[in-house]
Image (cartoon, helix red, strand yellow):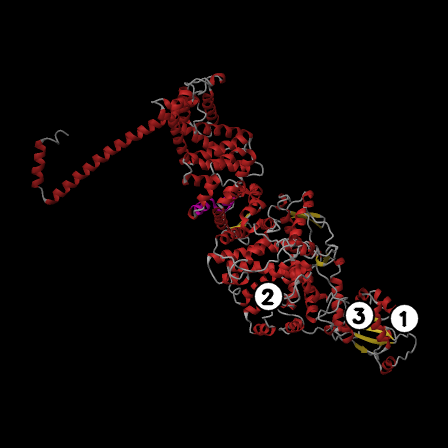
Amino acid sequence: LIQLHSVPFTSWSVIKMFSASQSSKAQFLDKARQAREERRELKERERAAVQIQALVRRFLCRCHLQKEIRLEDFFEATESGASKRSALSVFRIARKLLFVFNHKEDKERFEKLCRCILNSMDVENEPKVWYVSLALSKDLTLLWIKQIKDILWFCCEFLKQLKPDILQDSRLVNLHLTMLVTFTDTSTWKILRGKGETLRPAMNHICANIMGHLNQKGFYSVLQILLTNGLARSRPSLSKGSLTAIFSLALRPVVAAQFSDNLLRSFLIHIMSVPAIMTHLATLTPERLAVIESHDLFRKFIIFLSREAQCRDVCVCLEGSHTLCLLGNLVYLGSLNDKVLEDETAHFVGVLIHMLSYCQKYVSQKKSNLTHWHPVLGWFSQTVDYGLNESMPLLTKQLQHLWGVHMIRILFSDVLSKKLLENQEIAQLPTQPVSPQNSLPMKNLFKRAFQKSASVRNILKPVGGKRVDSAEVQKVCSICVLYQTTLTTLTQIRLQILTGLTYLDDLLPKLWAFICELGPQGGLKLFLECLNNDTEESKRLLAMLMLFCDCSRHLITILDDIEVYEEQISFKLEELVTISSFLNSFVFKMIWDGIVENARGETLELFHSVHGWLMVLYERDCRRRFAPEDHWLRKDLKPSVLFQELDKDKKRAQLLLQYIPHVIPHKNDGYEQLRQLSQNAMKGVIRVKFVNDLGVDEAGIDQDGVFKEFLEEIIKKVFDPALNLFKTTSGDERLYPSPTSYIHENYLQLFEFVGKMLGKAVYEGIVVDVHFASFFLSQLLAHHSDLQFFVQPPYHWLLDLGLTLSYDEDVMGQLVCHELVPGGKTIPVTNENKISYIHLMAHFRMHTQIKSQTAALISGFRSIIKPEWIRMFSAPELQRLISGDNAEIDLEDLKKHTVYYGGFHGSHRVIIWLWDILANDFSPEERAMFLKFVTSCSRPPLLGFAYLKPPFSIRCVEVSDDQDTGDTLGSVLRGFFTIRKKEPGGRLPTSSTCFNLLKLPNYSKKSILREKLRYAISMNTGFELS
């Protein structure tokens, strides 16, 4: 190297370089560059080797040291002397343990360290023992702060893994929480007593620093996990002390930061979203709720969330399940803070609407691969945390405060403060006549009190006068939007919500009074204008109408006739007339003006809501009239116009017949026009020939009569409960498909055939003596089912039976459990869900259990009778269409449309005796028996005897049925002139029901005719008699 750097060598190189050719210069330079690169790489390798060796030596040394330290016994002193260790000694032990710390291997050592530190803090008057005293050491302050931060975060790491329901883990939970509570606040530090008080600000600053470090690491997430593990269950596994500690720890950063938005956000997302935490606080440690109230936290939460962007941010972070938990806790807090609720009603309502609307976006109407089941929300398209399911009953109880009486009174105070009484004119009003129903004892004092007030109340009609843009109206509209959103979001507790909203008897009539006052003229015009205005104000007004309709429909559905007609709970009958007139016009306008044709979303929901309430009133009126004659008709709609539009396939005409056919008269003309609609081959003439036991065709030509007999024989067989295709309801013995009919082979084909025969009877106008349950008729019409037959209030006895939301069925000797909701067999029937249980059980018994049988029968029926043909009828009207009119028999109408044979005529003395006996000697029941004797049905045809097919006939007979060969010239003349071959006194009248024919001997005395006829009809048989 020395020679290379010498001058002679350099000179020689330069001389040689100048004398070399150009190519030699390039080679020389390239070799020099390669040499430099090699030297640089060599140095780099040497440096890397040194560094690697240092790292390896350090790693090996560290491992060796850790092994040596791990072999040491950190806690050599006896347990009795452990509390006397100096703070410095504890610090060194902690330093060693943290140096070698392993989560799995060092759990016990870390537990001992924590206990050692806490013991040091409990010693009296020995500053050198207090672990916190090291914070005052100039040399150790920073090291101590780092050490305590590490120790506390390891406590947090352990808390995330511990299960509070395990006894050993619950002790460790208390230990780690005590560590966190002790070193995040200076209130328990003995070093600050007396003269040490001057150090408090500095120490508070250290605590704030520690708290900030924990927050950055995810302190709130740790507390959320611990709270969820301990509280998201039917019974909390956290003790009072643990819950108090956790909540105090959660609140400290918020208070220290003077309720900054950032900390409020974290508190709401991680703490307030824990299922039913407010309920658990109220139960286990109510003093924490007092702390919340002292900091006015509920108001701060509501104001923070009232900013739309912040509320959306919180909802997005939580997703649906936990957003609902946050909502429940806020509602519960609201129920405890009347003053804040009254002051911040607008903000509170707005926050709840926003949170419910966020959840509603993910609520689905049906199961799919993208949905999950939620006990409150139903099918939900976001991920569902099934670990929260145990806490859902508590969450539901929290949410119930929203539709509880207390909160309804606060939120609807403007509506409920309205007076509905007249000006002290009670004495002038007529008293209600006493009836058997009125003499029944009132069910409770509330009903008595309300009945008294209802009898003196103004009849509420649309009057107008209140500006819709006023603050009062906007407030009430917002509240209605809140409850309407609640109904459409919390789908699985919808019935509970409706029941809560209808609990106060005066809310709905006062809400109707409020609606009547809206706009310049009130009522219909305002809401029709809202349909054409896509503004927020219009949507809010329509939401008010929807809520009123949904609640009123629910109320009337669960009230029995005594409560509606005699006690007149909530609404007077005159008000129901006014309301039904309003609803009828509103629905008609929506259909006739073309709004329903293109309706989507909220508009369609509004239509179904208003239409549902309208049809409940109409069905009630059909069963027992409260409205005047022709109340439901639209006088501005001519049937001829409607049928012209039907011929042109106009959509609005079809929708009118589908939804509100009662607005047009459908007596004679309407019914006849309906019958003229297109027919298919199934509706053609059917000819029947009977074959006797010997296989020989029976005599007789089918001119409607034989087919009628065939139809009667079929119906007589299939509707016999003994066959088990159909069952009867208890009490009124109305027919519906038997749930166990599946024991029959091809039972669905049988039901389809029965449906076709029933449809054929209706189509041909043949009345059959079959009476169906109202809920089954409703399904035949695709209407809302009436649940009254199922069970009547009061329902408290259900709670004594130990029932669950399931139904046990005995199937061929085996007990099969049907869950009414997912997981229903584990959910007991309680006071809160008893109404839901009634509806779920009724739906199961009336729909789910007989779904396939009903569908098959309806399929057969609709193959003959199109659904749109009978949509105009209510359930009672369809029953009348099937089995005839339930009115008394009109003998004059029957006489007018009777055909005589065999010499009989209208002036024949036997015929005169017959009509006189029927009119004056027979009771209404006997007249019904007579009609059934001749026609097989005890009721007259719906439109009178002019429509009885074949027509009612009376024939004079001289011989027995087996000798009867028909009318001859001689028999006719003898019958006409009352000439008898022999006295027929021993013979009974007979009938041929297939021809609606009465075969009457030519009796000589009226008394004999009366006796024989009464005997014949009481035997309940027809042509078999002789």
The residue type indicated by label 1 comes to Ile
Near mark 2 (Cα within 10 A), the count class, few <14, some 14-19 or many ≥20, is some
The residue lying at 67 percent from left, 61 percent from top is 626
Distance between the alpha carbons at the discs numbered 3 and 2? 37 Å
Work out whether 969 lies above or below 572: below
Residue 542 visible at all: yes
What's the distance in space between the residues labelled 2 and 1, CA to CA?
Answer: 54 Å
For marks 3 and 2, the one nearer the N-term is: 2
| Secondary element at tag 1 | helix
Circle 3 crowding by C-alpha within 10 Å: few under 14, some 14–19, many from 20:
many
The mark total stands at: 3
Residue located beneath label 3 in the image: 934
Q: Is residue 886 magenta?
A: no
In this orientation, does residue 329 appear? Answer: no
Horizontal arrangement in the rendering, residue 91 relative to residue 580 (left or right): left
The secondary structure making up most of the magenta span is: helix
Compared to 618, does 1 lie above or below? above
- Seen in the image, is 668 located left or right of residue 294? right
Marking on residue 658:
2
Residue 1018: % across, % down: 84, 64
Q: Position of residue 379 (x, y in %)?
A: 54, 50
N-term mark: 3 or 1: 3
> How far across and how far down the image is residue 336, in percent?
54, 40
Nearer the observer: mark 3 or 1; the answer is: 1
In the depicted structure, whether residue 952 falls above or below residue 810? below
Cα–Cα gap, marks 3 and 1: 19 Å
- Which span of residues is magenta-colored? 310-324
Dot 2 or dot 1: first in sequence order is 2
Q: Which mark is residue 1008?
A: 1
